[in-house]
Amino acid sequence: MRFATRILIGVAAASMVAVAAPAAASATTTTSASASYDSWGPYHSSDHNAKAEGHVKVEKKTYKHWYWKTVWTPKKVCKWHDGEKKCWWVKKKDKKRVWVWKHVDTFDVHSKLHNDKWWGKNKCAWETFKVVTNDGDTSFERFKNCHKHPKHFSFSGKDVAHIYVNVSRGDHWGPKGWNSGWQDVYHAV
């Protein structure tokens, strides 16, 4: 009876493996990074001769941060004195290389800048991005299009809290007017 039970248990286990193996082979692993994709725009200059639109991708990446940690370890020190062995415990400073998981939010902004008036005095379309980080620091990225066809631009960075865009008109050296005002591209929750 025990012999028959063992055979039946073995057959059941083998059939479970045969059924589970293809399912396990087709299973995919997911990474811990989570990404959000948002479209923004179209935003126009105040004279409607410049238009900007695009999308932003924000991704949370996880990485190992390695650093040196100082640890105090007890060591037994022994010395011979007048034929006797004397031992005592001392604390010795050691350095140990350890790591912790850290997270960083990276962003990629892609835009398409249209120019509907590529002749005359202010013939260039400008877009200015204002990037505010989680620390409160502000940086700016400017792009221009002085041609008839739309141009594609992109830039990236990390640890962003807000991204705004201002679409305007100007010459080859900078925006001169017809601003759209700061329009929201990305706003972290």
Image (spheres, helix red, strand yellow):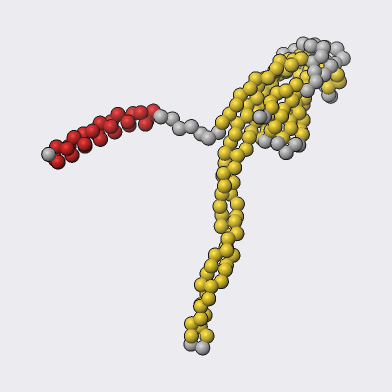
Viewport quadrant of the C terminus: top right
Residue at 61% across / 24% down in the picture? 37
165 to 7, vertically: above or below: above
Residue 136: give x, y in percent of width and height.
75, 36
Residue most extreme to the front: 1
128 to 104, vertically: above or below: above
Viewport quadrant of the N terminus: top left
Residue 118: give x, y in percent of width and height.
80, 13
Q: How many marks?
A: 0
- The quadrant in which residue 176 appears is top right
Residue 151: give x, y in percent of width and height.
71, 18
Q: Judge from the rendering whether residue 18 lies leftward or rightward of residue 82; answer left or right.
A: left
- The quadrant in which residue 50 appears is top right
Residue at 65% across / 20% down in the picture? 39
115 to 78, vertically: above or below: above
Residue at 51% across / 88% down in the picture? 82
Residue 92: give x, y in percent of width and height.
57, 67
Q: Judge from the rendering whether residue 80 lies leftward or rightward of residue 116; answer left or right.
A: left
Q: Judge from the rendering whether residue 58 lies leftward or rightward of residue 172; answer left or right.
A: left
22 to 49, vertically: above or below: below
- The quadrant in which residue 147 appears is top right
Can residue 85 be seen here? The reply is yes
Residue most extreme to the bottom: 82
Can residue 118 be seen here? The reply is no
Residue at 83% across / 24% down in the picture? 174
